[in-house]
Structure formats: structure tokens, C-alpha cells
Image (tube, rainbow, N blue to C red):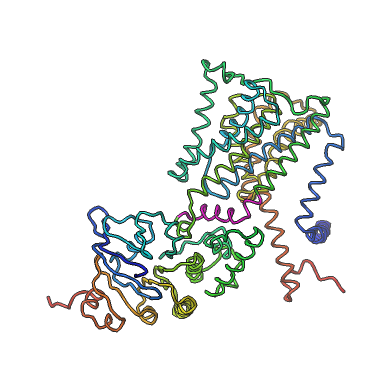
Amino acid sequence: MVLSYFRRAYSSFAAHVFDIPPRFMVLLFLVLLSIVPLTGLGTYYLNIIVSANVLAIFAVSWDLLVGRTGQISLGHALFFGIGGYTSAFLFKFYGLPIWLTIPAAIATGGLISLLLGFPALRVKGPYLALITMAFPLIIQNLFDWPPLTAIFGGRYGIRPLPAFFPFLPVTQQIIAHYYLTLFLLLMSSVIIYKIANSKTGIVFVSILDDETASKACGINITKYKLLAFTISGLFGSLAGSLQAHLLKVANPPMFSLTWSFAPIIVTFLGGIGTIYGPIVGAYIYYILDRYVLTIFIPNLFELFGYTITGELEFTKLLIFALIVLILVIKWPRGVAKYTTDKLEDLEEARDLDERGPRIWKRYPKKDT
Amino acid sequence: MHLLEVANLGKRFGGLTAVNNVNFHIDEGEMVGIIGPNGAGKTTLFNLLSGFLKPDSGSVKFKGEDIIGLPPHKIVNKGLARTFQVVRPFHHLPVIANVMVALKSPRGARKIEWLKTMERKAADLLEDVGLSELMLEPAENVGHGDLKRLEIAKALATEPDLLLLDEPFGGLNPLEVDFLTKSIMRMHLDEPRRGVIIVEHKLYALMKLVKRVIVFHKGEKLTEGTPEEIANNKKVIEVYMGGPFKHA
């Protein structure tokens, strides 16, 4: 009885909310996100969102390459690390300011990814995945190598790097970081979204679906594959460079498997091939990792009189894996994709309703 | 000058000779059929012409230019398009985007304008083959008969001067065959200078369409002639139906 009441209330709410055009929804989210720091949220929480923004940029670049073009890369950490190290390098040896090192890092990342694109012309599918996975691991060991410590800084990396806004007090810096990363995320995702929905984007998907057929359509697939790699590398290294300056360090773990797999997990959470999916996924990932498992659950246990200190650290990964597993099983096409599919279904049903036959009975027509 | 001139074309796969010493030519505006039993080398011939395979010997001249050794996309851009025997749609894309992949992007026009012109062109092409209703449907939801027509729309979108159709009627029911025959006819009338080569097993549909038929057998050109000549040719009947019946 009560349940059905709620369901009906939700339905009518949904019917009204989903009338809002998507553009307006995006704007609404942007406004919401931009007032977050004004609510007096703690630095810890703001940092979560800053990290999520950086990961989102990184994952969006992965999604364009893999979700849209079908060139499977398990070694995206290469671009991340290259971005970070280029920034660090230019600062350490040439003393370049931050607003020059980041564009330089982006350019280097693009160049490296163009070079990495060449093996992709020869091998496909799982073989390409394995090859791309090898590159960052090799470079990680190279940068870790003791004889090269003078250049690459060895295990501890190159540090300290300059901060973005050294003239601001620390609390203000984090707010500034928040707006900076949000702005860059917005910029890069809009650019990638535009590319993905242009003629070039259509050609990318045609390569994902059937290379032979796109050749027969007169597509120079070599050119387009290299283009996809380059674009992906540009934004991947932007994320790496941001990360390096935010943490003020570029170290070998930037090339580790963790950073290769993070964009994959995030993209699958949000919905592969959607471009907006990875952004949603990145937020879910960091909120789960840094809030739910580090703060929320221990606090919950404390309510019942248990104190958890070390134990959760070990089980955290297990719980995290379980949650991700459930999310992926429940929504195999991703959380964001599921939502938009639902919205489209609703819209279609409403169209049918307006056209005539009452197929959709849940939302009766308004009396006019 | 012929539109397409094939001279002494040969291709071997290991010990198997798929295409052996083939000579023929196509003129502008000609519609030619190629028939032959399974394994006669018809599809290999198409792969050789469209650049997906490199021949071992011989030459292929298209509009007077040698096109051997060019990659497939360059051959397509020169004006030689093909379809595939097994349909190869882009599953993730809607039907209209499938066609848009193949459309050439016009140069010089403003960006928004050309996206619109491309959409209009793609919609026109789909209307020609009778797929307007399925325009926005993802290709993975479209049935086989419609995909066959989509293949032709995709090939037409590259604005070819010579169109190679590899079994366009394969797997279609008689009604669909009838419809497709009509749209191929219409397409031929719209662009009378375009040459068309059709490989087909459904002879009753093919013979209505073409003026000249080339018969392949074991990688070689057996004979060629008008549909009537071919239909009454003893050698062709022997190849298709097997040798004369022998008593034990």
C-alpha cells in the first residue's frame, strides 16, 4: 500500500524531471558542482573530487580509444606517466613555469601515443592489449633503475614540483584546484564528446565494428587509428601532468598497472563507449574508495561499538571488488548508460502515448 | 578506352590456383554478370579488383590507370566500390551513420553545413534502396534482407564509377529479390555512365538485369556472351549441372 504510493509518487516525479532537456540537466549538474566548495566541505572531501576529476579526464581519453575505436589499450598508464614526468623533467632541468610544462607534457604525450599507434596497425585485439600493457612496465623499471637516479630520481621520483597556486593559503589552494580540474575536465570531455559525435567519431566506431568494411567504404584506417591514439594520448598526458603537479611528485608508480587499470574499471562502471560514462564512473570509484570504505563504514561500525583500525585495510579491497562486481553484474552496460537507456525508453513510450494507442499507461495524459 | 581492363590476372593460394589468366573488360554504363559454380574464383576476383588481395600476375587498369598494389581505400576513392557476400554492417551505428561513413566529406564547405548535407545525402541514398523507415535504427537490430540493401547503399555512397556487387540477392526471398532488382535497375537508370558487375547464383534474377554474362570455372574464364547465349551454352550447363550422365 505504502510502497505503491511511493512508486506512484516517484513515477510522477520522474515524468516531470525527465521532461527537462539533457542540455539543461548538464547545466544543472555544472551549477551544482560549481557551488560544492561554497558549502564549506572539508579539504579531504574536496580532494576526493579533485582526484576524481583527474581520473575522469584520464578515463575519458581511454574511452575514446577503446570504447569508440576498439584499439584495446591495457597500458594507458604510459601516457599518464609520460605526462607527469615531462612536466617534472622540464621543471627540474629547465625551470619552466607550470603553464609551460603542462602544454609541453600534452604535446609529448601526443607524440608518444602516435608512436605507440604504429604497433596497433600490425596487431589487433588481445595481442595489441598485451603489447600496450608491456610499454609502461618497461618504462617503470627503466625510471626505477638506480644508475639513472640522477636523471629520473629513482624510486622517489622527481620532487618537489611547483604547486598550481603557491600564492594562495592552503585551504584556498584546494578550492582553486577543484575549480581548475573541474574546468579542465569539462573542456576535455566536451572536446572528446564533440570529436566522438562528428564524422571522425563515426569513422572511429566503424573501425571498432569492422575494419574490412570500413576499408571498403574508402576509409584510410591507418590514419584514423593513429588519430585516435594521438587524441587519447593528448588527454591522457594532460591528466598525468595534472596529477604530478597536484601531488607535487612524478614517480615510477605513475606507470604501474594500477594506473593502467583504473580507467578500465571506471569506464566499465560508468558505461563503455559513452564518453560521459567514465566521468560518472570516476566519481563512483573515488567516493567508494575514499569515503564509503575509509570513513563511512568504520563510522558505522563505531556506532555499534566496534572500533576498526587495521582490519578494514585488508578487507577493503575485497569489499571494493565485491561492490564493483555487483554494479557491473546489475548494470553490465554501465550505470550511466543504464540511466540514459531508461530515459530513452520513457521518452519513446511517451511518444507512443501521444501518438494514440495507450501502450504506456503509467502516465495518464493531462486533461486539457 | 574501357572503364576496367583486366589482363592475364592470376592468383595462387599455395598449390591452389584461384584465378588463372583472366582477361575481360567492362565499358562505361555496362552491367555485367559473373556466374560460375562455387569455388570458381568469383569472390577472389573481386578481392583482387578491390585491393584486398594482391595478384601474382597480370594487370588491372581502371580508367586507364594501373590500380594493382594500391590499398583498398585508395581504390575506393578512385571510384571502384564493392559490396561483400556476407553482410558487413557497422553494428553499433544507426543505419544512416553506416552510410555516412562511406560518404566523402566535401571540402571547403562550412562544418555544420556539411554535416547537414551529409545527412541529407545519406537519407536520399537510403530512400533509393528503400530503407528510409529504418534510418535511425541501430544496424544490429536490422534484418538480413535490409542489411543486403544497406550494403548497396554504403557502396553507392562512395560515388563509384564501377560497382562490384557480390551476391546481392544471397539469402533473400523472392519478394525481396524482386524489390532489389528494381532498385538496382533504377540506380542504373539514374547513373547511366556507371559500370556494374554482379556476381550472383540466382540466375533468374541476374539474367533479367544484365546484357552480358561472363562464366567462370576453376579460376578461368570459360566463356562470355549475352544471357540467351549463355543459357543455351552446352559447356556452361555441363559446368553447372555436372558432366553428361554416364551409366555404370
- Which quadrant of the figure has residue A243? top right
Q: Is residue B50 above or below residue A27?
A: below
* Residue A115 seen in render: yes
How many numbered circles does the render carry?
0
Q: Is residue A266 above or below residue B64?
A: above
Residue A250 in view: no
Q: Nearer the viewer, residue B31 or A329?
A: B31
* The N terminus of chain A - image quarter: bottom right
Q: Position of residue A269 (x, y in %)?
A: 64, 45
Residue A264 image position (x, y, % from top left): 59, 41
Asked if the stretch drawn in magenta spans residue A343, the answer is no
Secondary structure that dominates the magenta span: helix
- Position of A77 with respect to B210 (left or right) is right
Horizontal relation, residue A160 to residue B107: left or right: right
Compared to residue B74, the image places residue A279 above or below, namely: above
Which of A56/A341 is in front?
A: A56
Q: Residue at the spot x=69%, y=48% of the render?
A: A190
Quadrant position of residue A102: top right
Image point (62%, 55%), residue name: A198
Q: Quadrant of the C terminus of chain A?
A: bottom right
Residue shown at the point (83%, 39%) measured from the top left:
A36
Q: Is residue B62 left or right of residue A144?
A: left
Q: Position of residue B212 (x, y in %)?
A: 33, 78
Q: Residue furthest left?
A: B248
User: The magenta stretch spans which residues?
Assistant: A193-211
Q: Is residue A196 magenta?
A: yes
Vertical order, A338 against A140 (above or below): below
User: x, y (%) of residue A355?
Assistant: 73, 74
